[in-house]
Amino acid sequence: MGAPDLIRNQVMWNRLIAIVEEQAQVLVRASFSTSTREAGDLSAGVFDAQGRMLAQSVTGTPGHVNSMAASVLHFLAEFPIDTMRPGDIYLTNDPWKGTGHLYDVVVVTPVFRTVDGQPQPVALFACTSHMTDVGGVGFGLGATDVFNEGLYLPLIRFARNGVFDETVMRIIRANTRTPDMVDGDIHSLAACNERGALRLGEMMDEFDLDDLDDLAEHIIDRSRQAMLRIIGELPHGTWHSTMRIDGVDEPLDLVAAMTVSATGIDVDFAGTSPQAPVGINVPMAYTDAYTSFGVRCIVGPSVPNNSGSLGVIRVTAPVGSILNAPHPAPVNVRHVVGQMLPDTVFGCLSQILPDLVPAEGTSSLWNILIDGQAADGERYVVMSFHSGGAGARPGADGLSATAFPSGVRNMPVEINEAISPIVFWRKEFRPDSGGDGKYRGGHGQVVEIGNREGMPFSISATYERTVHPARGRAGGGAGALGELRLKQRNEAVKPLGRSTIPGDDRLVMQFPGGGGFGDPTERDGDKATAERLDGLVTE
């Protein structure tokens, strides 16, 4: 391929990135739910006619993007590309063929070009976002199988000629506590794919393309080869790592074996704890997504994320383990365990590339899910993304109150205060929560929540790092454990499960901190002094 062709392909690649980011921004701006609009809990991407991911938006989360990369192939297996027609739109929330639980709806839209007077499929756009409610027992641990967890939508064609199937939409609306918000979010998903298709058509007109075949091969092959070159420079062999986390009634062990070879990186989770009776189980699609993301954070992070670069990272886990729970296992809050997987593979990578791998962090999100009844009798639900401290990095302190690996933003408390009687009386950094080290772990937060009307409310807690802390690395200390308590009664609130907060009391949440990195005696004196003056370190 000559230099002009390389330049042309690079320009088109950059256009694809711009297209999918505009696709994602349309979803953000059109969404009805705060989790998408305020926190960016979504994904968007473009795929070739074979279902291979070519480009992903910058806005989004790894659990959505990397699992969506596989979900498009499931759609094509159910609806072959030559059976699709202009105006078709497809949908699912199948946890095993989507992004891991029923709350995430995946929408896929084929794109056509007219060639010799006939419409020919050239690409697919896909997107995902988190719904506010899908019925069932709600977003928590109350279900014993996926059928209890809410409305299960298989892979379906829900629009023809651009017109939604009214029967499908009536079924969806009848099975959610927030029908208008869910209806609006599904329309926003379809709209963002439509925008992507429009912009892709403009690009193909500009570059006089009838298909994306050559561009797709260029993107995927060069990304794959770039990853293999980087992997080829690593020592070959197998490394092992184990991480113990809290679990529900007993601790869980995540066990990884990472093998580096000339053909790529294989991660095997044999020896990991068996699946649980409640919804912390992880479908393989989500395990694959966060494991490959953890590897990509350290190995070839500058290589574009697409089917080519992801294809050289292969993940396996025993069927029936908590990381490969088969249907119909409950998977409602699969993020509790699944978001620990980058830290697990970091344990292997730290033995290969010790100067690049950070310490462990809080990792699993501390989402605040509250519901109750207002004084006027109206029901309300508050869904708010928040996080503890991230692990310290080689050469830098950990980020405080920052979501890694999820990537979602902390949500402004004013948004939820405006739509409910819930008040966030305090939200501040938690002193002494970051693990000690040459580089300190990120600090957690202290959040104090009450009800302005003096009414009781319930919290569905799904929190990790309350028994087993984020471990430091290279001599760094562990991060502080998380804790929930009632302020007036000074009673503990359980970190997993549903609890009622009395109307005359407040819930105080102490978020965990990230682990430290390096010998604490080597910490820069000016930084230590500044921390003490700021009140972030008191000991």
Image: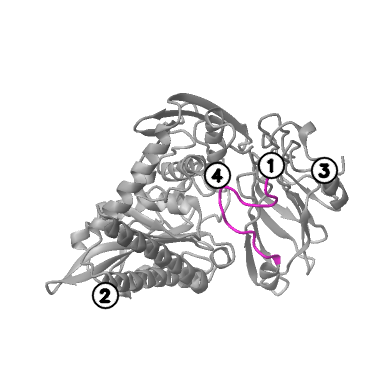
Please name the residue shown 54% across and 54% down the image.
137
Please name the residue shown 42% across and 35% down the image.
231
How crowded pointer 4 is (Cα within 10 Å; few <14, some 14-19, many 20+) is rated as many
Q: Is residue 492 shown left or right of residue 141?
A: right
Where residue 406 appears, as percent x and y from the top left, is: 56, 51
Q: Is residue 460 magenta?
A: no
Q: Give the labeled residue for mark 3.
A: 528
Q: Please state which amino acid type lies under the numbered disc 4.
A: Gln
How crowded pointer 2 is (Cα within 10 Å; few <14, some 14-19, many 20+) is rated as few
**Residue 130 visible in the shown view:** yes
Between the C-alphas of marks 3 and 2, the distance is 63 Å
Between 321 and 305, the residue placed more toward the observer is 305
Q: Is residue 501 shown left or right of residue 324?
A: right
First in sequence: mark 2 vs mark 4: 2
The span picked out in magenta is: 396-413
Between the C-alphas of marks 1 and 4, the distance is 14 Å
Q: Give the labeled residue for mark 2.
A: 161
Q: Are marks 1 and 3 in contact (CB under 8 Å)?
A: no
First in sequence: mark 3 vs mark 2: 2
Please name the residue shown 35% across and 55% down the image.
54
Between the C-alphas of marks 3 and 4, the distance is 31 Å
* Residue 481 lies in quadrant: top right
Q: Are marks 1 and 4 in contact (CB under 8 Å)?
A: no
First in sequence: mark 1 vs mark 3: 1
Q: Are marks 3 and 4 in contact (CB under 8 Å)?
A: no
Q: Secondary structure at mark 2?
A: loop
Q: Give the labeled residue for mark 4.
A: 339
Q: Please state which amino acid type lies under the numbered disc 1.
A: Gly
Q: Please state which amino acid type lies under the numbered disc 3.
A: Ala
Q: Are marks 3 and 2 in contact (CB under 8 Å)?
A: no
Between the C-alphas of marks 1 and 3, the distance is 17 Å
